[in-house]
Image (cartoon, helix red, strand yellow):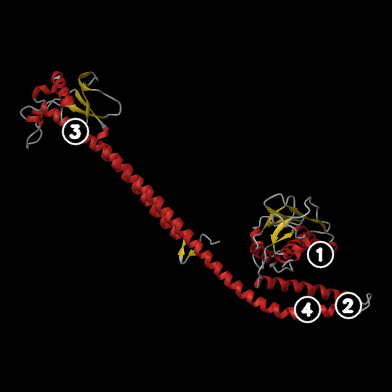
């Protein structure tokens, strides 16, 4: 697992994520600013259109007629109904008390409203404009008490709104695309580094395996001689001889080293497994019976309940299956406290036949059970950490699998799943188990 602060091929993750975040924030801020500007532009656009109508109406009413409500009714009606402004939907003239003096069109909701005071034209100056001499108080126009109200259809500015939404959507999609690309890049880099680490680990393990296989091969012959000679010496000495216990210790340690050598060779040079139909029951029983002396020495009971089926046919390699069952049961035995028990059951009420081995040990708490299948990972003080790795390697070859889970209130349950063989036909279970 690569740390968040670890570099991906020289690229610090936090710096990369910070750059992506800064660009995303800049895009969002720019989109919001652009959207606000477009909304303001829409308002200015509608105001400009309303101002065009105002200018048109003021230009049509000159002199005293500008303050004449009757003239306004005529001009408003003509302009709204047949004027050049298709977006003009309503126009009205009111006095300072809010009374309607002239109106045209239909005032509906949603119209853009524009208001402007109606001023009388200045005397002697057309349109109320003053010359270059500046303001002349004697000719200052009197403030009008009339107000022109114009209602504009806002849909005429919808193209600005659509453009604002489009720009905002493009910015959001750009941020999402950038985030997605950043996530994909980090995930790709993570996978690449994980694969590179796995390749490095495999090369390291291959080197260790080669060295271990060579050492194991060289150790096996003298170890066998030590064990054999010790057993011969033990047989020749009287049973009450003082060295009997010492020689028993030598034989026991030689057997432990022999198992270590076997595990190393099995892991470094796995043999090809066969997949034949065989009866599971006698193999499980024989493996459990072979461990009963050790269980008796540790004061642990091995419980093997009977099942109704006379034969439990599975597809597996006989020797490989025996080794897997031995590894799992010896682990359960090592984990069990004195006075505890190990329950070995066979569940054939499913497409895959399962062998369950449950102990009353401390369990593995919150540790990832996948760790125990890694080579040289063990909780034992005298273990090699290869038993479960070899077991999974064997099961993979004939389509089996193995899982671990904590037991409540204490202990661990290991399940070995095997493919059901359907039927062994006329072949006897003993013959099937002895094949290979």
Number of numbered discs visible in the structure rendering:
4
Residue pictured at 53% horizontal, 61% vertical: 3
Q: Return the x and y of residue 372 as percentages of the image width and height.
A: 67, 62
Residue closest to the eye, 177 or 358: 358
Residue closest to the eye, 86 or 73: 86
Give the class, few, some or many, for how many residues have Cα within 10 Å of label 3's Cα (few <14, many ≥20). some
Q: Secondary structure at mark 2?
A: helix
Q: Return the x and y of residue 129 as percentages of the image width and height.
A: 9, 32
Q: Which residue is mark 1?
A: 290
**Nearer the N terminus, badge 2 or badge 4?**
4
On screen, residue 176 above or below 275: above
- Measure how far apart labels 1 and 2 are at the Cα level: 22 Å
Q: Secondary structure at mark 1?
A: helix
Q: Which mark is residue 224?
A: 4
Q: Which residue is mark 2?
A: 234
- Measure how far apart labels 4 and 1 are at the Cα level: 21 Å
């Amino acid at each position: 697992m690569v740390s968040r602060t670890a570099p991906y091929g020289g690229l610090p993750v936090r710096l990369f994520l910070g750059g992506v975040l800064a660009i995303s924030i800049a895009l969002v801020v720019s989109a919001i600013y652009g959207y606000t500007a477009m909304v303001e532009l829409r308002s200015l656009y509608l105001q400009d259109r309303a101002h065009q109508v105002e200018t048109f109406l003021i230009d049509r009413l000159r002199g005293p007629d500008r303050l004449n409500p009757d003239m306004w009714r005529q001009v408003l009606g003509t302009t709204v109904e047949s004027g050049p402004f298709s977006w003009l939907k309503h126009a009205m003239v009111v006095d300072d008390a809010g009374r309607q003096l002239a109106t045209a069109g239909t005032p509906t909701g949603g119209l853009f409203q524009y208001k402007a005071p109606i001023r009388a034209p200045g005397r002697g100056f057309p349109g109320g404009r003053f010359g270059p001499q500046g303001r002349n108080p004697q000719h200052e126009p009197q403030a009008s008490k009339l107000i022109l109200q114009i209602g504009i259809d806002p849909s005429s500015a919808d193209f600005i709104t659509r453009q604002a939404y489009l720009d905002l959507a493009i910015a959001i999609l750009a941020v999402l695309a950038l985030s997605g690309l950043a996530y994909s890049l980090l995930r790709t880099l993570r996978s690449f580094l994980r694969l590179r680490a796995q390749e490095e680990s495999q090369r390291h393990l291959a080197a260790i395996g080669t060295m271990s296989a060579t050492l194991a091969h060289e150790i096996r012959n003298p170890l066998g001689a030590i064990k054999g000679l010790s057993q011969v010496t033990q047989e020749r000495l009287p049973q009450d001889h003082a060295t009997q216990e010492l020689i028993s210790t030598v034989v026991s340690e030689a057997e432990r080293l022999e198992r270590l050598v076997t595990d190393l060779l099995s892991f470094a040079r796995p043999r090809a497994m066969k997949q034949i139909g065989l009866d599971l029951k006698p193999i499980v029983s024989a493996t459990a019976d072979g461990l009963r002396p050790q269980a008796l020495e540790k004061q642990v009971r091995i419980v093997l309940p009977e099942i109704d089926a006379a034969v439990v046919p599975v597809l597996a390699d006989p020797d490989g299956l025996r080794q897997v069952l031995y590894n799992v049961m010896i682990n359960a035995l090592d984990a069990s406290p004195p006075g505890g028990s190990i329950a070995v059951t066979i569940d054939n009420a499913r497409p895959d036949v399962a062998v369950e081995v449950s102990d009353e040990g401390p369990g593995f708490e919150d540790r990832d059970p996948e760790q125990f299948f890694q080579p040289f990972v063990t909780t034992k003080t005298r273990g090699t950490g290869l038993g479960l790795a070899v077991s999974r390697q064997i099961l993979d070859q004939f389509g089996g699998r193995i899982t671990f889970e904590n037991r409540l209130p204490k202990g661990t349950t290991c399940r070995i799943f095997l493919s059901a063989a359907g039927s062994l036909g006329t072949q006897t279970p003993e013959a099937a188990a002895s094949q290979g």
